[in-house]
Image (cartoon, grey):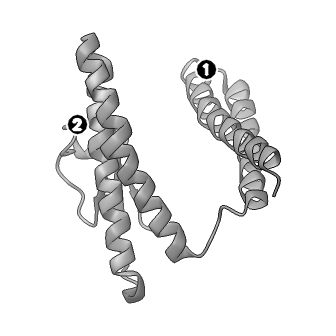
Amino acid sequence: MDDKIRNALQQAYLGEAKAVLRLKMYADRAEQEGYKQIARLFRVIAFSEEIHGMRALRVLREIKSTEENLAASFESEKTVAEIAYDQFVKMAEQAGDKAALLHFSQSRDVEETHAKLYKQAMNHFMEERETVYHVCKVCGYVADGVLPDECPVCAAPREQFTTFDS
């Protein structure tokens, strides 16, 4: 594939992925403010943008076998936690920005747990181990199997977790 086309597809994917998240948050805000139809519109367009992003990934041939996807995801989480977030934490500390520091340090800790979960999945891939996951809606921490009484990263109560069992 031509490098310019690859770059354009990667930019399109990143733009679509950002739009999906932003639009979902806009929908949540519109819902909170009582604008149900506008919230629905934001969610519909987010879904459409998600399709655009998935199509770009397909054209880029970024989706491989599950084993390859697990390995790539593990490496990505590890890099983000060990390099990017560590740098972000240092920046926030130097700037004295406590809100950013909390966000970056908690996100780093959660990224490390994501890497561990991917590593476990790679190690148990052939066993086809099934588990229930619980995700903290405050910081994104993922609990494997057991719903904690409180989040080990941000101390949110168990009521702040969403369960994924299918």
Q: Which residue is mark 1?
A: 34
Residue 60 quadrant: bottom right
Q: Residues within 10 Å of mark 2 (few under 14, many from 20)?
A: some
Tell me which residue sits at (33%, 64%) in the image: 117
Element class at badge 1:
loop
Q: Position of residue 144 (x, y in %)?
A: 29, 63
* Of residues 149 and 72, the one drawn nearer to the viewer in this rendering: 72
- Which amino acid type corresponds to the residue marked 2 in the rendered image? Cys
- Which amino acid type corresponds to the residue marked 1 in the rendered image? Gly
Q: Position of residue 111 (x, y in %)?
A: 34, 48
Residue 33, compared with residue 143, is above or below; it is above
Residue 107 quadrant: top left
For the view shown, which residue lies furthest in the front direction? 3
Q: Is residue 12 left or right of residue 110?
A: right
Q: Which residue is mark 2?
A: 154
Tell me which residue sits at (31%, 71%) in the image: 120
